[in-house]
């Protein structure tokens, strides 16, 4: 088995059919799809079962269904990683869908570059209701092979795009780097750590996933769990004080900016200023200016309303 694609499912009854159909339309015989029901209370799994019933017997055997009580996306992914049979592991959120050339592109690169530890690519970012394209998410880098490339790593950490769905990783690496549980932004900790290991990376300069922006998603608006996720991600990266510190700080800047903006929208002005002082943002122009600009745009939109 060349690839295991992991798809956690929770409250996605409006999207899961599109997600699965994008997979089955192009599913090669050497790929398995692991669907984890994270205790979804809606009709998501009924729709999954309906789609699978329409497949041939051989295709149905390529799908593995795991059921668990609601424990969150990290636990779901970790449980799937532990049973994955593929040489490589990929991830897909169940409210997104893959491009028509997803498997062909990835498997071709696996064949051509069998010693690569991690393949990365980007995604088309679109708005749920209007279907309007919002841009490209993920590492927008030149196609090619990279190993211990300082310039490449600086670009990756500067973009700070750590989403799981934009990477295919060797199974043994993922098995050693399970997702931290019960937090948001768990991808930051997992993939920043992997990138700093002595691995070979191949970047595919294509958008292979369609990423849906939902207003109801867990990272769409400020809330306590999201803010806690930012805090933990920042603390995790601040531990690096070795030769890679100059690389890591590029992601730290982006995370601190996002964290402080969320503090402003969720806590209000007083708590925001306290956090600005705590993170020395008033004396760090790389943090201060983006924070002021982003909050200014936020206030401007509110005034227009």
Image (cartoon, helix red, strand yellow):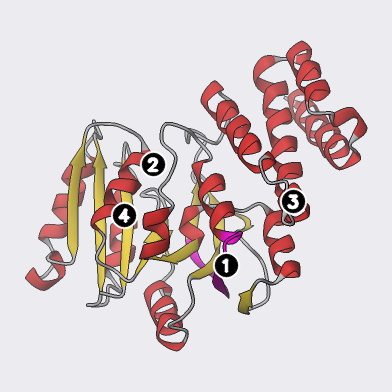
Tell me: 124 left or right of 303: left
- Residue 191: % across, % down: 54, 54
Distance, label 4 to label 2, CA atoms, is: 10 Å
Going 46% across and 57% down the picture, which residue do you hit?
A: 165
Q: Nearer the viewer, mark 3 or mark 4?
A: 3
Which quarter of the picture shows residue 45?
A: top left
Given residues 112 and 265, the one toward you in this image is 112
Given residues 79 and 26, the one toward you in this image is 79
Q: Nearer the viewer, mark 1 or mark 2?
A: 1
- Residue 84: % across, % down: 26, 60
Q: Count neighbours of disc 4 (C-alpha within 10 A) and say few if under 14, some if 14 to 19, many if 20 or more.
A: many
| Quarter the N terminus occupies | bottom left
Distance, label 1 to label 2, CA atoms, is: 24 Å
| Quarter the C terminus occupies | top right
Contact flag, marks 4 and 1 (Cβ < 8 Å): no
Q: Which mark is residue 81?
A: 4
Q: Is 206 colored magenta in this rendering?
A: yes
């Amino acid at each position: 088995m060349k690839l295991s694609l992991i798809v956690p499912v929770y409250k996605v009854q409006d999207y899961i059919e599109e997600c699965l159909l994008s997979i089955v339309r192009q599913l090669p015989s050497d790929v398995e799809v692991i669907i984890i029901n994270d205790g979804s209370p809606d009709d998501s799994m009924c729709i999954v079962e309906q789609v699978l019933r329409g497949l041939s017997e051989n295709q149905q055997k390529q799908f593995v269904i795991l059921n668990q009580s609601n424990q969150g996306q990290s636990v779901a992914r970790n449980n799937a990683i532990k049973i994955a049979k593929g040489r490589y592991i990929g991830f897909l959120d169940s409210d997104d869908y893959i491009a028509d050339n997803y498997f062909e592109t990835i498997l071709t690169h696996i064949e051509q570059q069998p010693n690569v530890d991690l393949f990365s690519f980007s995604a088309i970012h679109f708005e749920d209701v209007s279907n309007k394209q919002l841009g490209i998410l993920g590492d927008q880098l030149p196609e090619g092979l990279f190993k211990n490339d300082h310039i490449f790593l600086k670009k990756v950490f500067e973009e700070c795009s750590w989403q799981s769905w934009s990477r295919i990783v060797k199974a043994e690496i993922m098995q050693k780097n399970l997702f931290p549980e019960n937090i948001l932004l768990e991808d930051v900790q997992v993939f920043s750590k992997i990138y700093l290991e002595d691995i070979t990376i191949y970047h595919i300069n294509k958008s292979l996933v369609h990423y849906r922006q939902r207003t109801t998603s867990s990272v769409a608006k400020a809330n306590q769990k999201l803010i806690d996720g930012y805090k933990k991600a920042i603390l995790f990266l601040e531990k690096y004080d070795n030769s890679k510190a100059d690389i890591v700080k590029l992601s730290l800047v982006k995370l601190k900016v996002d964290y402080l903006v969320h503090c402003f929208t969720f806590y209000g002005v007083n708590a925001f200023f306290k956090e600005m002082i705590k993170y020395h943002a008033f004396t760090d122009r790389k943090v201060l200016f983006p924070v002021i600009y982003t909050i200014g745009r936020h206030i401007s939109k509110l005034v227009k309303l």
